[in-house]
Image (cartoon, grey):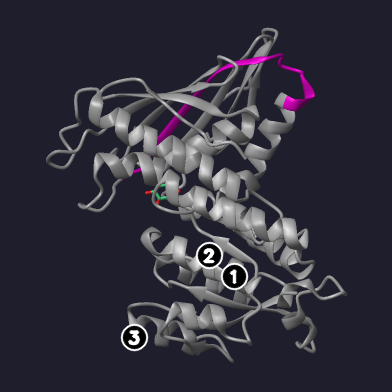
Amino acid sequence: MTTAETAAGVLPALADVPSGELRVAVLGVGMMGADHVARLHSRISGARVVAVSDANAPKAEQIAAEVPGCRVIADPLAAIADPEVDAVVLATPGQFHQEQVLACIERGIPVLCEKPLTMDAESSLAVVRAEDEYAARTGRRLVQVGFMRRFDPEYAQLRALIASGEIGEPLVVHCAHRNAAVPPHFTSEMMITDSVVHEVDVARFLLDEEITAVTVLRPRPSRHAFAGQSDPLLVVLEMASGRIVDVECFVSTGVAYEVRTEVVAEDGSAMIGLDLGLVRQSGGSSGAVRVTGIAPGFRERFGRAYDIEVQRWVDAARRGTIDGPGVWDGYAASAVCTAGVEALRSGQRTEVGLAQR
Ligand code: ISE
């Protein structure tokens, strides 16, 4: 029996905490990790940050000093193994995720892993297999992947509208993913793995089916693109049922953060991301639209989604489960992005070969 398999169905470490609060280690305190520490400390109930870890030791010390009772544990694997840590938020660079997520599964503690789950399809599949094996033994899922848009009220509303059948069968989805600017190391490949990956998850979330093939087109680059970077990109995702999702990814617009999704269905269409809530058009009626302000970046646009995501993760972790996208969603996104990078390089339509589960 592992430590997580005790009779009460509660993680044993939790039983040791008088307040019942989830004791969280945040690994990686760059922008995302530091935001999560602040969020857990000030806006989330039922959890407290007891440890942080980062390759940048002074940054870790600075963040820890802002949270009473928070320690710095230099080695992330030691933080995962620490008996006073009940759960982990992983915001380390993606190349470390596989080892760190596997260590959480090995110890039987919940982990909220920022995207990507891992760096490629093969390593993500290894995580799926490890968690499946754990779940077969214990009946519990441990790994939640940080696709925060699923917790954004507009995406949730759009998904509910599709599910209601009111606009009929969705046929095409148009996604725009525009950043005002990105750092100079942001390559065309990263446009797929860091930016388009969110649209990949949105397509699967909204349409409830897998992506089977990817094509990447390179329009004439903006004069603001970095040398060698194809900005913007047009990515075409073919869904299993024949629906098409197109994604315009443009990361040097100089404007603001524009992330829009329009679903075109047999009996109407619906759009989100205009900073106006859901705008729906069907049967001749249309929402009057005047854009008054655009979020400057994803932290502002999805701040509420992150709060909802983390609160629901904490609540679920305290019950010994997850409440959101899991390892398969992380694997499917990795597989599509692996195919997307291949399609970008080859200029060819590339099929996504998903493994059997
Ligand atoms: C960034 O890494 C994110 O995850 C944002 O959500 C995305 O919009 C942005 O393009 C990425 O660079």
Q: Is the residue marked by circle 1 packed among few (<14), some (14-19), or many (20+) residues within 10 Å?
A: some
Q: For the residue marked with disc 2, what is the amino acid?
A: Leu
Q: Quadrant of residue 13?
A: bottom right
Distance CA(mark 3)–CA(mark 1): 30 Å
Q: For the residue marked with disc 3, what is the amino acid?
A: Pro
Residue 108 seen in render: yes
Q: Is the residue marked by circle 2 packed among few (<14), some (14-19), or many (20+) residues within 10 Å?
A: some
For the point 42% across and 82% down, the residue is 75
User: Which of marks 1 and 3 precedes in the sequence?
Assistant: 3
- 285 magenta-colored: no
Position of residue 235 relative to residue 126, above or below, is above
Front of the two marks 2 and 3 = 2
Position of residue 8 relative to residue 136, above or below, is below
Q: Which residues are magenta?
A: 163-180
For the point 57% across and 51% down, the residue is 128
Q: Quadrant of residue 80?
A: bottom right
Q: Secondary structure at mark 3?
A: helix
